[in-house]
Amino acid sequence: MDQVPVGILHCQKYSYDRELDTVCISCSKTADKKGFYKVNLHDTVLFPEGGGQGADTGTINNVKVYDVQREKLAHVHYTKQPIEAGPVKVKLDWDRRLDHMQQHSGQHLLSAILEQEPYNLKTVGWALKEKVAYVELNTTGRQQPTSEQLDQVEATVNQWIKDATPVICHTKKHSNDEDRPTSLPDDYVGDQGVIRTIEIKGLDLNPCCGTHVEHLGHLQIMKLLQTENIRSGNMRLYFVFGQRVLDSLKDLFDISRQLNKSLSVPPTQFVDSVDRLQLQTKAQAKAVRKWQAQCADQACSGLKAQLDKQSVALVFDEQQDADMSYLNMISMCIKDKQLLEDNPTAAVILASGDRAKGGALIVICEDADRLKQVSAKLMATLQGTKGGGARGRWTGKSQSFEGLETIVDIE
C-alpha cells in the first residue's frame, strides 16, 4: 500500500476532521538519536509542517505524535513508541489545529488587505509563533504605515470576518512547467503531487499547502499588535486572530487586576500612577546618591587616619548585596583628595557585601609591585577570590570576607 501524497492528504481536504481510520504501512525498527520512531501511514489527519504552518500533534492508537514532517511527497510521523503495521486510528489535537488555521487563514486575509490601495504593502514572509504571529512587509525605501492606517487595516480585516467570506481550496495536478509556483519547495516533485491554491472569494488567490478555515467567520476577530523595524529595512507587523485575541485579553485583564491591587487605582489611572512612582523613584535615587557621596567623603577621612598609622587601609561596606557604585564613589574621592599621591606604597582595600557570602573588592595602590602583593594576599586569604587589574587599580570578587581585616597587617 502506498502513501497518499502530501497535497491531497485527508487533513488538507477535510481540515475540520478530528480523527481518521487508516493504515500504518511501516515503522522504523529502532528509535533515532532523539528517541523517535518514524511512522509511515497511508493517509493522515495530522498536517505535516509546511508553508509557515507548524506540524499538528495528536495520537496514533493513543500513542502520542510529537511531530509530522514532509519528505518530498511523503509524510512521516514521529512517536516515542513503535507502531505496529496494520489498521490504526489517528486523532488530532484540535485546539492546536484550530489555532493554526485561524492564524494562517488570517495571515492570508491580512496580507491581501495590506497589498491593496492605499497601502500597497507586499508581504515577503510570515512567522507563526507560540502566542503571536507576524507578517514581514517590504517597507525598504518607502514610508511605513501610520497608526491611523493600521487602524483602518484592522477595521477592514474585521469587516471581512463579519461577512463570513468563503475560503475555497483549488487543486490541480502538479507539473514541472512554467506554471509551477515559486513558493513551491524545490523537493516537492513527482507525478502524484498537486498544486493547492487558497482563494478568499472576491479578494485573494494564493498557492498554499496549509489547512484553512471554511469561511472567514471562523477567524472570529483580529487584533493588530506592535510593529518592529528590522535590519533589512522591512517592518514586522504582529497580529493575533481568534482564540489568541481572547487569550491576550485574559492575560491583560489578569495584569490589570494585579496592577489595580498594587497601585490602588483603576486602569484608567495606571499611567499617571506609574509616572508618579517613577518620579518618586528618581528623587529617591538622587537622595541615595547624595547620601552615598557624603558617606564616601567620611570614608575617605577615615582612610586618611588609617594611612597615618599603617601602610594598608580598609573600608568594609558590610551589607547583604555588594554595592559597586558606592565603592567607585570612594575610589573617586581617594583620587580627588590625592590620598595616595605622596605615599606610592600605601594601599587601600575597598570591600562591599556580606561577610559570609563575600562580594566586590577594589584595591588601589600607585606602586605596581605593591598592588600585586596586596591583591595576592587577598586571594590567598579570602575564600574563592578572583580578580585582576593594572595601572593602580585591582578589581575582584570574593566568596567570603572572613579574615578580611587581617590583610591590613601586611608588611
Image (tube, rainbow, N blue to C red):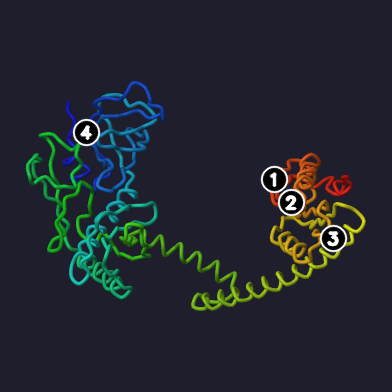
Q: Earlier in the sequence, mark 1 or mark 4?
A: 4
Look at the picture and state if 262 lies above or below 362: below
Q: Earlier in the sequence, mark 4 or mark 3?
A: 4
Residue 41 located left or right of residue 407 = left
Callout 4 amino acid: Ala
Callout 1 amino acid: Gly
Measured in 3D between alpha carbons, the distance from the residue under mark 1 to the one under mark 2, in whole angstroms, is 8 Å
- The answer to whether the residues at label 1 and label 2 have Cβ atoms under 8 Å apart is yes
Task: State the residue position of label 1.
Answer: 387
Measured in 3D between alpha carbons, the distance from the residue under mark 4 to the one under mark 3, in whole angstroms, is 78 Å
- The answer to whether the residues at label 2 and label 3 have Cβ atoms under 8 Å apart is no
Q: Element at badge 4?
A: strand
User: The N terminus is located in which quarter?
Assistant: top left
Nearer-the-camera pick, 409 or 164:
409
Q: Element at badge 1?
A: strand
For disc 1, the neighbor class at 10 Å (few under 14, some 14 to 19, many from 20) is some
Per the rendering, the mark at residue 162 is none
Measured in 3D between alpha carbons, the distance from the residue under mark 1 to the one under mark 4, in whole angstroms, is 59 Å
Task: State the residue position of label 2.
Answer: 361
Task: State the residue position of label 4.
Answer: 74
User: The C terminus is located in which quarter?
Assistant: top right
Measured in 3D between alpha carbons, the distance from the residue under mark 1 to the one under mark 3, in whole angstroms, is 23 Å
Measured in 3D between alpha carbons, the distance from the residue under mark 2 to the one under mark 3, in whole angstroms, is 16 Å
Q: Quadrant of residue 72?
A: top left
Q: Element at badge 3?
A: helix
Q: Element at badge 2?
A: strand
For disc 2, the neighbor class at 10 Å (few under 14, some 14 to 19, many from 20) is many
Callout 3 amino acid: Leu
Nearer-the-camera pick, 370 or 379:
370
Per the rendering, the mark at residue 303 is 3
Nearer-the-camera pick, 100 or 43:
100
For disc 3, the neighbor class at 10 Å (few under 14, some 14 to 19, many from 20) is many
